[in-house]
Image (tube, grey):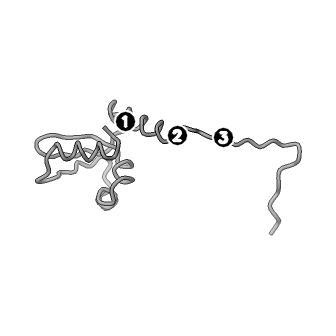
Amino acid sequence: MEPPVSPAPSEQQYSLKWNDFQSSILSSFRHLRDEEDFVDVTLACDQRSFTAHKVVLSACSPYFRKLLKANPCEHPIVILRDVRAEDVESLLRTFDYL
């Protein structure tokens, strides 16, 4: 096995830093959801529905991660029985998603 090759002395290396990455990514996810771009899951309860992104729900909730992983549909509709729409809105707001 050959040793790793280090860059030649004449090569320059750059390091990029994105200072406001967290606020930018959250804002981008909100915009994608508001525009319904790439939404891939619907939460239904209390005669209302909310579209969302599986990756956001999965990253923020072990419950949704397990549920969505066990049911790998392209665009599942998750029916939340005995759950109020206000509670789903609050949950999505907690995920900083509304």
Q: CA distance from mark 3 to mark 2?
A: 12 Å
Q: CA distance from mark 1 to mark 3?
A: 25 Å
Q: 51 or 17, which lies in front?
A: 17
**Residue 37 sits in quarter:** top left
Find residue 21 and name its label: 2
Q: Earlier in the sequence, mark 1 or mark 2?
A: 2
The residue positioned 39% from the left and 49% from the top of the image is 55
Q: What's under tag 3, amino acid-wise?
A: Leu
Q: Residues within 10 Å of mark 3 (few under 14, many from 20)?
A: few
Dot 1 falls on a residue whose secondary structure is: helix
Please name the residue that numbered disc 3 is placed on: 16
Task: Check the image and report above or below for 48 versus 77.
Answer: above
* Residue 67 relative to residue 22: left or right: left
Dot 3 falls on a residue whose secondary structure is: loop
Please name the residue that numbered disc 1 is placed on: 30
The residue positioned 48% from the left and 42% from the top of the image is 22
Q: Residues within 10 Å of mark 2 (few under 14, many from 20)?
A: few
Q: Residues within 10 Å of mark 1 (few under 14, many from 20)?
A: some
Q: Position of residue 90 (x, y in %)?
A: 24, 44
Dot 2 falls on a residue whose secondary structure is: helix
Q: Position of residue 87 (x, y in %)?
A: 19, 47
Q: What's under tag 1, amino acid-wise?
A: Arg
